[in-house]
Image: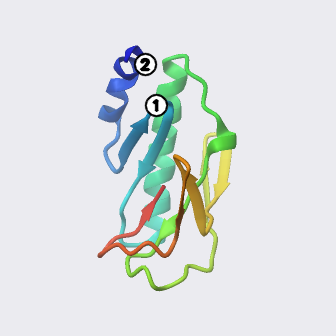
């Protein structure tokens, strides 16, 4: 409970994405009309998150960073992988990620949006 109180204000720093927390796992999601807009938003928001963690003397674990881009139609496979760069970190999007022990793939149907986890 104290940990949740400690990190409670982190959500106030995001303008172009949403942050979801479960225990010490944080997931940033964003929606955009184009891949370049999506990547730009997520790179900016990731830098904000890392800055917040550093300012609050917390450690980020880049080994756990992962990204997935989900097509809004859900039936079109995104064959290109995309790199996200922020601070000294770089991650490449994948066709599937594991979030809280659940594998999520890029075939998840969403209406009129792109998202990243």
Q: Nearer the viewer, residue 93 or 38?
A: 93
Q: How many marks?
A: 2
CA distance for labels 1 and 2:
8 Å
Check the image and report above or below for 21 versus 3.
Answer: below
Q: Residue at x 38, y 81 (%)?
A: 73
Check the image and report above or below for 83 versus 35.
Answer: above
User: Residue 78 at what x, y percent from top left?
Assistant: 56, 79
Relative horizontal placement of residue 112, taking residue 42 as reference (left or right): left
Element under disc 2: helix
Q: Residue at x 31, y 45 (%)?
A: 15
Relative horizontal placement of residue 8, taking residue 42 as reference (left or right): left
Q: Residue at x 58, y 58 (%)?
A: 97
Q: Residue 94 occupies which quadrant of the picture? A: bottom right
User: Residue 89 at what x, y percent from top left?
Assistant: 66, 44
Element under disc 1: loop
Relative horizontal placement of residue 17, taking residue 83 as reference (left or right): left
Q: Most extreme residue toward the bottom, as rendered?
A: 76
Instruction: Indicate the quadrant containing the N terminus: top left, top right, bottom left or bottom right.
Output: top left
Q: Mark on residue 3?
A: 2
- Pointer 2: residues within 10 angstroms few (<14), some, or many (20+)? few
Q: Mark on residue 12?
A: none
* Residue contact between numbered discs 1 and 2, judged by CB atoms under 8 Å: yes
Residue 88 visible in the current orientation: no
Kindly identify which residue carries mark 1.
23
Relative horizontal placement of residue 12, taking residue 62 as reference (left or right): left
Check the image and report above or below for 83 versus 54.
Answer: below
Residue 98 visible in the current orientation: yes
User: Residue 28 at what x, y percent from top left?
Assistant: 44, 47
- Pointer 1: residues within 10 angstroms few (<14), some, or many (20+)? few
Point out the tag, 1 or 2, that comes first from the N-terminus: 2
User: Residue 12 at what x, y percent from top left?
Assistant: 30, 33
Q: Most extreme residue toward the front, as rendered?
A: 101
């Amino acid at each position: 409970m104290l940990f949740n109180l400690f990190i409670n204000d982190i959500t106030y720093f995001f303008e172009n994405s949403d942050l979801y927390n479960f225990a010490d796992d944080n997931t940033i999601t964003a929606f955009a009309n184009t891949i370049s807009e999506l990547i730009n938003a997520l790179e900016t928001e990731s830098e904000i998150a890392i800055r917040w963690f550093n300012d609050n003397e917390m450690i980020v674990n880049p080994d756990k960073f992962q990204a997935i881009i989900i097509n809004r139609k859900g039936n079109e496979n995104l064959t290109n992988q995309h790199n996200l760069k922020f601070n000294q970190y770089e991650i490449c999007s994948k066709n599937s990620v594991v979030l809280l022990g659940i594998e999520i793939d890029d075939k998840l149907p969403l209406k009129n949006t792109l998202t990243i986890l």
